[in-house]
Image (spheres, rainbow, N blue to C red):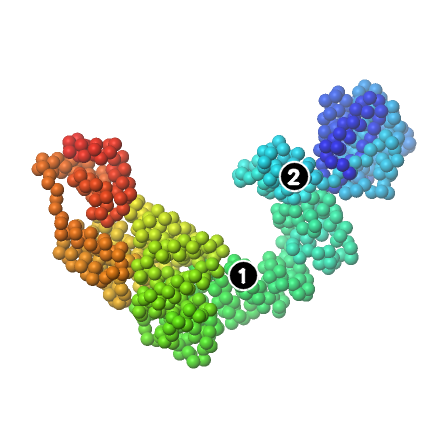
Amino acid sequence: MVERHETQRILYDMFLQAQNGSGRAVLIAGAQGMGKTALIHKVQARAKASGGIVLTSLASKAERDLQMGVISQMLVAADLAPKQTTLLNSLSDGRLPPSAVADGVHRLAHRLAECAVLVITVDDVHEIDTSSLHCLLYLIRRMSGSRILVVLGECAKAPPVDSALTTEFVRNPQCRLVQLSRLSVECTASALAGLLSTEEVRDTVSCWHHASGGSPLLLQALLKDRGAVGTPESAGPVAGEAFKLAVRYLINQLDEVTLLTARGLAVLEASATLDNLDRLLGLPGGTASQTIETLSAIGLIEDGRYCAEAARSTVLEEMVPKERARLHHEVARLLYESRATSGAVARHLVVGGPLDESWTLPLLRDAADQALCNNDAEWTITCLRAAHDVCEDERQRAVVRAELAHAEWEVEPAAVRRNLTRLMEDHRRGYLNQRQSTRLIAYLLWHGRPEDADEVFADLNVVQKPLSEESKARLETISVWFAHSYPALGARDSHAFALGEMTLDRSVRAVNPQMDGALVLHTLMTDGPTSNVLKTAEQLLQSVVLHDPPVAPTIAALASFVHASQLDRVSDWCELLLQGAERQTPMARATFAAASAAVESWLGNFEVARQRADQALSLMSSTAWGVAIGVPLAAKVLACTAQGDYEEAADCFKVPVPEMMFQALPGLHYLQARGRYHLAMGRYHAALGDFHACRDLMAAWNLDVSSSLSWRAYAAEALIELGSPAQARELLVEELNQQGTHNRWVREQSLRMLERLDTVRQPVMKPEMVREFTATEERAIDRLSKAEQRVVRLAFQEYTNREIAAKLFVTTSTVEQHLTRIYHKLGVRGRGDLLAILGSGAIDH
């Protein structure tokens, strides 16, 4: 057993000996795909390049009974003289005895070798017919002193010791037997050397070697796939169509038992053991170990596992679907009887389809519970969908449907939305337990169905006494979120539970973050952002932020700091939450990103806010967000508007939102953001309408104004633009009295506007300058947006960028972006040119 480069050296050396008049024969043995044919082709190419005569043939299982088939194939391909052709005909017509035929072939070969070195190759010699083999052996024993080289390729993981061919090559000193094994790592590196850089070869050779299983055929297929169109750039192996074709070729060469073993291994995966294989396939003990050796020899498996997942999947794809399902069912039964884990059994039940066995439903539900405990929501959903398919009655299906909704809720709440009507029917029929009905309230609130949520809540409230303590705690928690999210409907007395009688001291010692978050939120709504509330919120965040923080209590704690106008603190916590969000569900990541986007937009960090809003909206579809869609959309609108990207801001309003959103808190954020967009676009009446809608809702809901929901300062700006400074002043004074010292952010903004109303004076301008600007406006101003027009007018009055920003209540960078676009539209280089060209009145339409 030698390396490939050593095999090539041996063949070259034997070719030289034959060329020098010392006949030689080589038998190259190896499993399928080990490169026998490639080596034979190299010998043929060398012989032709040296002016030699090459006689080739390929033995076939289909022609094993065709006497002299291989010899005839070989000689027909040669360019023979008429006399030699006549001899060939006489050899193959069956009239001569075998000894005469063999002697005739021998004489013909020697005559050809007198002209030039003669190279005879037979590939797949293990399929050769008996008479052709007799002729070849006759020739090999008599080629000493001739210029003949015989190269044979045999497909076998090891040459059969009892064959005549092996015996001849072992005892004859003129013969050499070469057994090809799988490629070593060094040989694999040599094959990669001309295609990858030295560093890439060093870093990836082990991956290439493992994926190919040391098979030259599979390695070449992987290399071909690497250069295929559409294949991602990668230094490592990427299995594609060429690899799959190579695997199909290999498995098509297998005998029936070995092929069955390959299929069994593909289905069993990690549960593959020799004992399991024998039991699954019904094979005599020890058979699997022999067939596994064959599969290992051709590079498909290593240590009982497929080297490449693409190889395993190809074997599965080649199976008839019905047979594949049957094997998965057999594996499921085998593992269940062996007391394997429910997850291991469930994987085969899922792939194989429904199985009518009494143990399948409880096993699938148990596997789903285990997956949910491991935060594997996707697998939980898969198991529960399979469980739903095997349910025997409607009550079972209702229970599994509720469990499925709980799992889908963490991944894609839109899926739950599609089943809400069915879940409501299940609740009304009494099919759901208390926990499932409580969860249903949360789904209904999220997706804008508070009336249905109120119905479920009332049903559970009626039977409050029989509820377990755990169920009572869940209802208490959901009642707080009901009141918080839907202030009008959720504030009903029927939702009042014992939560209001508890104190935050309980929360500090609790181990239930859901209840803790509800207590924080309840106290916040009743007492405001007191120091005790903020202290408890801080403790709550510290306890959960590093351990898969649950969404509801985390948002409750963040809301406490928002109401206290400690936005920088909220921003810091959001950063920590997002840093560890990779392990969270898509819903959790989306919610935290939306919270961060909102806070950053209120702080004026508009680029960060925009990025976070886009992140949140990309993690869940718009329908999955329910009424909460208002939060990320509002944050993005505020950011885009502040940056002057009005087109992108307008696109946000094209996203469908639930009508019920405007009866929930996210609707307030949405209305305020839309009002500020209208304000930036100069649509002052529309802006005022949105701000008044905020006013009316907050009054009806008896909500305090916070930095996130302030509207008076922006309404005052609209009133100023509409020529109502007195009403604007009243709003600003009311804003300052309402905010007190809790909201420095809105307070400073209101004070600036009051100062503007008190000290507004137009700069002294020459009458002719005013006329010149007016004349210019008539011809050029229409090129600019409403926001750009306001910036131009203030720039023409020689206000600085900072002063313009203060007057328009935007950032200095936004003013600079406006001016850049204005310069481009008007074809000027800077402010100096702008003032000159405006003053000259030289701009055309």
**Label 1 element class:** loop
Pick whichever of labels 1 and 2 is earlier in the sequence. Answer: 2
User: For the image shown, how many numbered marks are present on the structure?
Assistant: 2
Mark 1 or mark 2: which is in front? 1
Amino acid at the residue labelled 1: Asn
Residue named by callout 1: 374
Disc number at residue 219? 2
Amino acid at the residue labelled 2: Leu
**Residue in view at x 57 percent, y 38 percent:** 235
**Residue in view at x 23 percent, y 62 percent:** 740
Q: Is residue 273 left or right of residue 240?
A: right
Q: Is residue 425 visible?
A: no
Q: Which quadrant would the N terminus be assigned to in this image?
A: top right
Q: Considering only vertical position in the picture, is 836 above or below 603?
A: above
Q: Is residue 256 left or right of residue 545?
A: right
Looking at this view, is 372 or 746 the one in front?
746
In which quarter of the view is residue 800 placed? top left
| Residue closest to the far bottom | 465
